[in-house]
Amino acid sequence: MPQELMAQLVIKARSRLRTLAGCDFTCVYLPLTTNALDHLLQNNNHLQFAFDSYSGQISAHNPKHKLFNSAFKLIPKEIQSREPLNALTIFMDGSGASHKSVIVWRNPCTQKWESDVQVVEGSPQVAELAAVVRAFERFNEPFNLVTDSAYVAGVVSRAERASLREVANPKIYNLLSKLIQIVSHRKQAFYVMHVRSHTDLPGFIAEGNRRADALAMSIELANLPNRFQQAQLSHAMFHQNPPALVRMFHLTRDQAKAIVATCPNCQKHQLPSLGQGVNPRGLGSCEVWQTDVTHFPQFGRQKYIHVSVDTFSGATFASAHRGERAKDVINHLVQAFAVLGTPNKLKTDNGPAYTSAELNRFMSEWGVDHITGIPHSPTGQAIVERKHQTLKRLLEQQKGGNEIAAPTIRLSKGLFTLNFLNCSYEEPDPSILRHFTNSAKHKLTERPEVLIKDPDTLQIRGPYPLVTQGRGYGCVSSPEGPKWIPGKWIKPFLTKTSKPKQPENAVA
């Protein structure tokens, strides 16, 4: 109730005045009418207790002094703005390695970038605080302060009318004291903005922050080429995935993802990550290939792209042709054999070109075992089907502007990116290196014994050594040779240990 709150305030005020001055109020003014005041003093217990033993005057009328007629604000107006100001923008940074304390701004009159760089010994926090103090000392007009340091942004936002505790570092203590003094007595407004560092976002804020970062670098690092910019140029050329940027330019994962995220072509045609597929793979290079054809209308008459992929390494070869007949398949395979080698086994679908007698004679001449999948079931060709999607999206990303290159050049550029640049975080080597070095990523260093369910007899067999396994499949070494089994039919083999016999309870 308002009467109870008023009574509590009177009690606190009388108690505080006795503590400070040892006396009581001469007159207490309450914001009530005369009738309401008389009624409450007679009937309200809270006000009666509040004015117990009070010998002064209780009035419902304010004094006539002009001080009591003016608007009184207990909390002064904040100088720090909660919204960006239409004023000068200052960027700051500090480095503990170079000991540079930097503030950068663009002159509103000349529109040229200006800077103030000083060498400050100490930690990065000392260099950053020194830059902030210089910014407040130098600019008395309203300004926006932009920093990529969460520490500085937090300190400046809480500096106004703050009380400072003891700080072990004397340099930081002196800088904090000076900052609190300047901010608390400042007349013009200011705004503090925290931004992320090392981003490639467009705009004035990102440009100013990059300039401050560059000035804060050491001389050795400043003279070196910017690897981040090199990665940007390379991605603009080839549009490789983030793991490839990490491997080639030694960037962090966040930096590589930022480059891909700010690429307009990659946002329009996002390149999927390198999946492992669900089909059984070869245990080495050129053991099992998958071949198929896809259509890409932008190539005009050469819209039939024949694709072959090695199921072990992921190395890919593709060629553009004017048809998908047997002679086109043979022309493609001859080129693929010249680049990647001859496979032991080639798997295709049941299309007319792949089941023709002409292609069978070609396979016999080259000594390639040709097999086909289940009719009308594309899941048996999942690896090459996924490669179709990856290749066509990459061709869209690398298409460029108005001047579109010939199909052969575009296809060669896409194959170079897939084979020599793209990789994954699990396997940092590109597919062409895995193909020719025959790296055994999928081969297990230890071969645990497993039990399998035979697909032919549906009987449990084993134990057999597990050669390799993937998503939904596994390969075991059986007496008949390597046998591919669905993952749900593979169980670990656990040896049974004999339990010691428990002594029988004696019967009395």
Image (cartoon, helix red, strand yellow):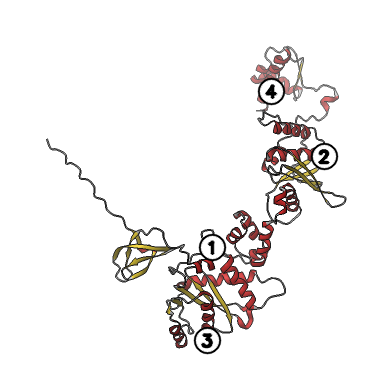
Give the Cα separation between the discs numbered 2 and 4.
46 Å
**Residue 188 vertical position relative to residue 312 in the rendered view, above or below:** above
**For marks 1 and 2 on the same chain, the one whose residue lies earlier in the sequence:** 2
Residue 153 coordinates in the image, percent (x, y): 70, 41
Q: Is 318 positioned to the left or the right of 447 in the image?
A: right
Q: Give the residue at the far bottom of this rendering.
A: 358
Give the Cα separation between the discs numbered 1 and 3.
35 Å
Instruction: Name the residue at 74% across, 46% down.
Output: 146
**Residue 507 vertical position relative to residue 414 in the rendered view, above or below:** above
Give the Cα separation between the discs numbered 1 and 2.
53 Å
**For marks 1 and 3 on the same chain, the one whose residue lies earlier in the sequence:** 3
Quarter of the image where the N terminus is located? top right
What amino acid type should be assigned to the residue bearing mark 1? Answer: Asp
What amino acid type should be assigned to the residue bearing mark 4? Answer: Leu
Say which of marks 1 and 4 sits in front.
1
Can you identify the residue that label 1 sits on? 429
In the structure shown, which secondary structural element does the residue marked by tag 2 occupy?
A: helix
Instruction: Name the residue at 70% across, 17% down.
Output: 14
In the structure shown, which secondary structural element does the residue marked by tag 4 occupy?
A: helix
In the structure shown, which secondary structural element does the residue marked by tag 3 occupy?
A: helix
Can you identify the residue that label 3 sits on? 327
Q: For residue 224, what is the image quadrant? A: bottom right
The crowding category of the residue bearing disc 1, from other C-alpha atoms within 10 Å (few below 14, some 14 to 19, many at least 20), is some
Closest to the observer, 466 or 155: 466
Can you identify the residue that label 4 sits on? 9
Q: Is 499 positioned to the left or the right of 263 in the image?
A: left
Say which of marks 1 and 3 sits in front.
1
**For marks 1 and 4 on the same chain, the one whose residue lies earlier in the sequence:** 4
Can you see residue 464? Answer: yes
**Residue 263 vertical position relative to residue 155 in the rendered view, above or below:** below
**For marks 3 and 4 on the same chain, the one whose residue lies earlier in the sequence:** 4
Can you identify the residue that label 2 sits on? 138
